Image (tube, helix red, strand yellow):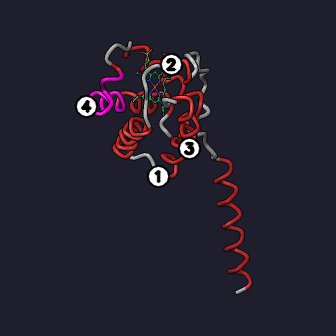
Amino acid sequence: MVIRGGLIAACLLILLGCSSATQTTLYQRLGAEQGIAAIVDGLLYEIEHDERIVHHFADSDIGRFRAMLSEQLCDLTGGPCQYSGSSMQESHTGFNITLADYDALVEGLIKVMQRQQISIADQNALLALLAPMYKDISYR
Ligand code: HEM
């Protein structure tokens, strides 16, 4: 019995050791460069098909938006990038973005992450990084 208890403790120690040795960044868990590109492209598709918010992007350079959002998500999640775009306040001023608009975009993002089978924990980790930006993006 004592031997079995010792074995179980040893196995647990090995498992714990392994899990900390294989700790990954959110960037890696989202699928690194390819995974983030797929999230951004999926989100662009959702925005394009969401009549509640698509009008905000009518005059935007979508190529730039795509590149800047990818870079920002890479940077935020611990990837090897440095966001080089405008601040959230600068880039969203004048669009009169409401809480409902913000929620619609986040709803699209969640749909995409579900489709890509990203775990709920990782979905929440990304949303938690984006949530504080609301105050700079929304219309005041
Ligand atoms: C999670 C929240 C959001 C993040 C992280 C985000 C991020 C970004 C980034 C990185 C850019 C590019 C900035 C640049 O060009 O330097 C951008 C631009 C833009 N965003 Fe957002 N955004 C968010 C929410 C929203 C929402 C809710 C809307 C409207 C429904 C929106 C509408 C726009 C538009 C229209 C542009 C293009 C501005 C232009 O044409 O210059 N964003 N956003």
**What residue is disc 4 on?**
49
State whether residue 115 is above or below residue 7.
above
**Residue type at mark 3?**
Ala
**Residue type at mark 4?**
His
**What residue is disc 3 on?**
128
Mark found first going from the N terminus, 1 or 3: 1
**Residue type at mark 1?**
Ile
- Separation (CA) of disc 1 from disc 3: 12 Å
Q: Nearer the viewer, mark 1 or mark 2?
A: 2
Left/right placement of residue 81 relative to residue 42 reads right
State whether residue 35 is above or below residue 63.
below
Residue 43 among magenta residues: yes
Could you say which disc has been placed on residue 91 in the image?
Answer: 2
Task: Kindly check if marks 4 and 3 are in contact, taking CB atoms under 8 A apart as contact.
Answer: no
Residue 9 among magenta residues: no
Residue 30: % across, % down: 49, 39
**What residue is disc 1 on?**
120
> Does dot 1 land on a helix, a strand or a loop?
helix
> Does dot 2 land on a helix, a strand or a loop?
helix
- Assess disc 1: are there few (<14), some (14-19) or many (≥20) residues with their C-alpha within 10 Å of its C-alpha: few
Q: Nearer the viewer, mark 1 or mark 3?
A: 3
**Residue type at mark 2?**
Ser
Q: How many marks?
A: 4
Question: Ligand 1 near label 3 (Cβ, under 8 Å)?
Answer: no
Task: Kindly check if marks 2 and 3 are in contact, taking CB atoms under 8 A apart as contact.
Answer: no
Residue 75: % across, % down: 59, 27
Q: Nearer the viewer, mark 2 or mark 3?
A: 2
Q: Which range is magenta?
A: 42-56
